[in-house]
Image: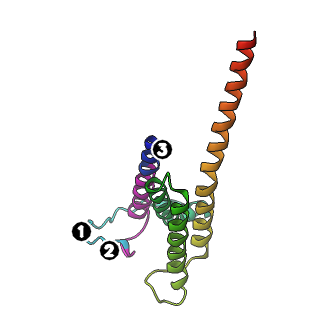
Amino acid sequence: MKKNKNIYFLFSILSIITGFLIYYFLRKNNILIYKWLNFLPKNDNIVTFSRESIWLNFIRYNLPDGLLLLSGLLFLRSIWYEHIRTFLLYKIIYLFIIFLFEMLQIFDNILGTFDFYDLVTMGSIAFLESIIPKILIIRRRSCVIKWSITELRLLES
């Protein structure tokens, strides 16, 4: 069990680092992260592309928010791995706060720019984060059952 907790924690760290690196290398210096983390050197060497595309815009503008959300969810899962009800409670509270912050940007009550695609990305990532562990558990159980059936057949032979 501790191994699974550590894997969730590791993926939490990797997703926050990936989201931060996308912000740092693909976005301009005028975003909020530079105000919050004012010790960071300004990056004037933004990676540019010859042509804009929907996928590039998704990676540049929406994916970092989704990765930051994923990082938080994986961190919560790593802390309360054995206590699913506690995890679900904190997950609901965390998602409510994140979505509330995004919605408050519509009315300029919080710094940032509202983007509908951020909501779609974060909702999709939250959904995938909730079903992937269930799929893995079902696969693990089916492998154990298949292994047990094969072992029984070998014993009968």
Residue furthest front as drawn: 156
Q: Tag 1's secondary structure? A: loop
Three-letter code, disc 1? Phe
Residue furthest top as drawn: 157
What residue is disc 2 on?
Answer: 36
What's the distance in space between the residues labelled 2 and 1, CA to CA?
9 Å
Q: Is residue 130 magenta?
A: no
Decide which of tag 3 and tag 2 comes sooner along the chain. Answer: 3
What's the distance in space between the residues labelled 3 and 1, CA to CA?
34 Å
Q: What range of the chain is rendered magenta?
A: 11-32
Please identify the quarter of the rendering in which residue 129 is found. bottom right
> Where 139 falls versus 99 (above or below)?
above
> Where 102 falls versus 43 (above or below)?
below
Three-letter code, disc 2? Trp
Decide which of tag 3 and tag 1 comes sooner along the chain. Answer: 3
Q: Tell which of 137 and 63 is nearer to you.
A: 137
Three-letter code, disc 3? Asn
Q: Is residue 31 magenta?
A: yes
Q: Tag 3's secondary structure? A: helix
What residue is disc 1 on?
Answer: 39
